[in-house]
Amino acid sequence: AIGFDRLVTLILKEESIREVIAFPKTQKGICPLTIAPNEVDQKQLDELSLRIVPRKQ
């Protein structure tokens, strides 16, 4: 099945799907726009009433 991003690539006559993909993928596994995943500061956690619980080894 052809995906929407591939269809748009064909319609726009682009050479690469990366030119039209909504969320660019990198080999580093991060989002270049938001630098996610990243550490969250305590203020952000407090706003959402969240806390980080360390894993038990």
Image (cartoon, rainbow, N blue to C red):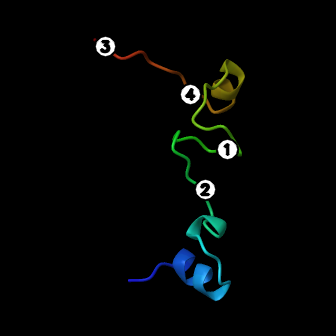
Labelled disc at residue 56? 3
In this view, which residue lies farthest toward the left?
Answer: 57
Mark closer to the chain start, 3 or 2 = 2
In this view, which residue lies farthest toward the top?
Answer: 57
**Callout 3: helix, strand or loop?**
loop
Mark closer to the chain start, 2 or 4 = 2
Query: Could you tell me how far apart the alpha carbons at marks 2 and 1 are, in whole angstroms?
Result: 8 Å
| Quarter occupied by residue 19 | bottom right
In this view, which residue lies farthest toward the front?
Answer: 15
Using the image as rendered, state which of residue 18 and residue 47 is in the foreground: 18
Task: Name the amino acid, label 1.
Answer: Pro
In percent of width and height, residue 10 lies at 59, 85
Circle 1 sits on which residue? 32
Q: Identify whether 33 is placed above or below 52.
A: below
Circle 4 sits on which residue? 50
In percent of width and height, residue 17 lies at 57, 70
